[in-house]
Amino acid sequence: MTDFDFWKRQYQDTWGRSSQRETDIAEYLAHESGACIVPVGLGAGSTTFLPGPASSHGASKGDADLMVKGTDIYLEVTGPLVQSVDHNQGLWVRPDKVENARQNMQSKETWVVHHLPKGDLIRVILLGEEFFQALKAGDFSIVSPRIRGNQEQYYEIPATHRCVQPLQRIA
């Protein structure tokens, strides 16, 4: 039997900081661009525990957190919540986020918005054709760090890769 709530429980104590980061990113982007940024992902901008799979709440696994209202642009807010990661280290993106973007490429433009607390750096990655060509070419490896006692998996995108851009690339 699958425990759909395992990862939710593992990270529940970080939801307050993650939710605040999503809200801060949305407010910053709205201020800079004049666009209306709204939470759309399961639990985005919230600390409410929603048990069960995403599908039981009308969502899909790996849905992005935010949407630019009136567009087909979706934003997945991510990044470490610790100061120890610096700008030279690779950016980690969950495989389910990448797969969701791939499956929805025809109807959605999905951007990873990677926030790095050290230096308050925000970088973006468009999960589009160029990204998926680089993925297919083997530019990104899978890393399997042990976090909170659990083996996790992420795509690691080198910080200097051409797909990693400064924030102004979205606007």
Image (spheres, rainbow, N blue to C red):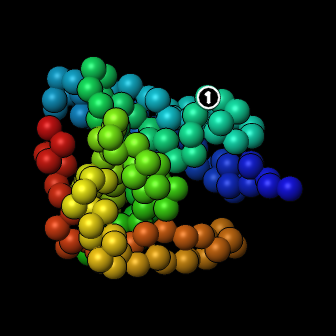
**Which residue is found at the position 58% from the left and 34% from the top?**
59
- 133 left or right of 100? left
**Quarter of the image with the C terminus in it:** top left
Q: Quadrant of residue 139?
A: bottom left
Which residue occupies the foreground of this view, 65 or 107? 107
Q: In this picture, is 14 found above or below 58? A: below
Residue most toward the front?
106
Does residue 102 show up? Answer: yes
Looking at the rendering, which quadrant does residue 155 occupy? Answer: bottom left
Residue 71 in the image, given as x and y percentages of width and height: 26, 26
- Residue drawn where x is 40% and y is 78% of the image: 141
Tell me the residue that label 1 is attached to.
58
Left or right position of 64 against 145: left
Amino acid found under the numbered disc labelled 1: Gly
Image coordinates of residue 132 in percent, x first then y, are 31, 62
Q: Position of residue 110 (x, y in %)?
A: 33, 44
- Above or below, 16 against 14 in this view is above
